[in-house]
Image (cartoon, coloured by chain):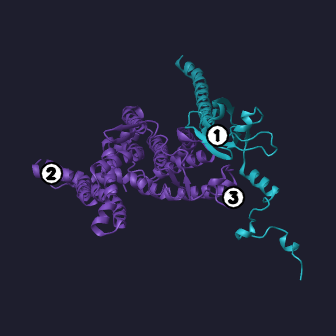
Amino acid sequence: MSAQKKLSTMFSRYAVVIIFVIITVAAIPPSGLSVTYILQEIITRLGRNSFLVLALLLPIYAGMGLNFGMTLGAMAGQIGLIFAVNYGIANWQGLVFALLVGLPVAVLLGWICGLVMNRAKGREMVTGYILAFFINGIYQFFVMYMLGSVIPMGNKAIVLSRGYGIRNTLNLESVRQSLDNIVMLRVAGFSIPLVTFIIIALLCIFVMWFKKTKLGQDMRAVGQDMAVAESAGIPVEKTRIVAIIISTVLACAGQIIFLQNMGNLATYNAHDQTGFFAVAAILVGGASVTNASIANVFVGVMLLHAMFVVSPLAGQKLFGSAMIGEYFRQFIGYGVIALSLVLYAWRTRKAAAEARLSLRGARSGPAKGNGKPAAENGGQA
Amino acid sequence: MNDTITAKSAPQSKTRRRLVQGGLLVVYILIMVLMIFTGRRHTILIDNKDAADGSYSAINGMEVAIDKQESAEYYPGDRDRALVQGQRHTIQVTIFDGNTSIEKTFTVPLWSDMMIISVPKMAAGLEPWIEPFTMAEQIEEAQESGPPAGEMSFQSLGGPAPEGTEEAQPSP
């Protein structure tokens, strides 16, 4: 392979990361923020978001693409937190309680999501996205009507004045940063939430261990080729459901970690952007629809959130309005996802064309085929 | 031979599996209950007021600390709150006059959100010095007793007229 071709391949593979690094680094000087401040913000946001982004890994391994259905897990986590606040359970005990309440809900929703995705093979991403909208409707009904009317809520402070339904914003003061503050390390002027990072590290170890297990290997096999995996005796559909259930449960825990750090819960829309920002982060980190690693998660969270920190102030300085920076965040988030998907499709086609060319070269004659790239058959929506 | 072993061991493993699943469910519920018992937060009101019947009077300066929380000073008529987690707690009172110290342990009922501790009552050795406190009851009591003479009425603050005032007005 020539050096030019190598460079071109590398650029096409890491285009999103390269573009993002350039934009972020260029935005730092006009923002006027100190490097220390940006680093502290990145540390905080790593603790807040990494768990959620790690939840995306297993479905990618199982060939189900980026799990936009993780929003379902986020909703389950929020239901758990509502009950923890309702019963007045504070501190880390409140978080564990929320997790225990949210866990069965997340398993149920993950199972439903897996069943639906098995009926939409090859279009998991768009299916997950729309399924999240559907379950959101049920969540709204549950929180807006069932809580307080069918399910009694003892804490009147969180119930709407009409007597049922939960208020738009919940104050999570009782559990606010309770995980982060168990052990807050101070190193060279930086505050590091040690326990949160230990939990994230444990999840990374779990993911690495899980990949080596029988189930993990099955997931890889299913992700590479479902037909081959099926013929090898792997229960493809069951394996895919398990991948989605684990992802949903992790998203449930991730949302609880996220919200305890934030300290308040926008009851009806906190979960709306969960999947979107997690997907944007992992893509910024260099992952693709079919390939992701733990490193992608951390690089992505750092880059995306560095951009989020500097962009409002850079927008303020450059255009005279912080709102420009806010728009920039949204634009970048959606832009990254779109660019990644386009690049993925382009790479798939290019790889197929190259494979066809090499086949022609090997046969030293015109190839006979249906004209469709082979990789398209296993491609994602 | 092998078939016989498989046929015998299948129900056994099924039973064992069910037992493990049942055990896990019990552990799951136990952890939840444990979290409720150890994590439930209560508000403790610390009161330093005279008794309505004159059976005890407010302490003229004291320092009160609950568990290992920061202590606070109280003077006659003061009332403050402390947030506690769990059910068993200790209250430490240091009275400035004579520098006497009192330490008592108390238990908060699990589903009680707010309790009030009357420190003068506790110092006088009267029971019960800790009682449940509900805002609704307090409002009811205040309404029953009516506004004290000489104080501003609700109407003078622009509020709605109390019930029955219109009937009481003489007709022209």
Residue at the extreme top of the image, as rendered: B1
Mark 2 vs mark 1: give the one in front. Answer: 1
Estimate the x, y position of residue B82 in percent, counting from the top left.
61, 42
Residue at 30% across, 46% down: A299
| Three-letter code for the amino acid on which mark 2 is drawn | Leu
Mark 3 vs mark 2: give the one in front. Answer: 3
Distance, label 3 to label 2, CA atoms, is 64 Å
Colour chain B is painted in: cyan
> Considering the numbered disc 3 on the image, is that residue within a helix, a strand or a loop?
loop
Indicate the quadrant where residue B116 lies: top right
Indicate the quadrant where residue B62 lies: top right
Image check: B58 left or right of A335?
right
Residue at the extreme bottom of the image, as rendered: B172
The chain containing the residue under callout 3 comes to A
> Considering the numbered disc 2 on the image, is that residue within a helix, a strand or a loop?
helix
A349 versus B31 height, above or below: below
Colour chain A is painted in: purple
Q: Which residue is mark 1?
A: B61
**Residue A327 appears in the picture as rendered:** yes
The chain containing the residue under callout 2 comes to A
- The quadrant in which the C terminus of chain A is found is bottom left
| Three-letter code for the amino acid on which mark 1 is drawn | Gly
Q: Which residue is mark 3?
A: A163
Residue at 85% across, 69% down: B164
**Residue A87 appears in the picture as rendered:** no
Q: Which residue is mark 2?
A: A7
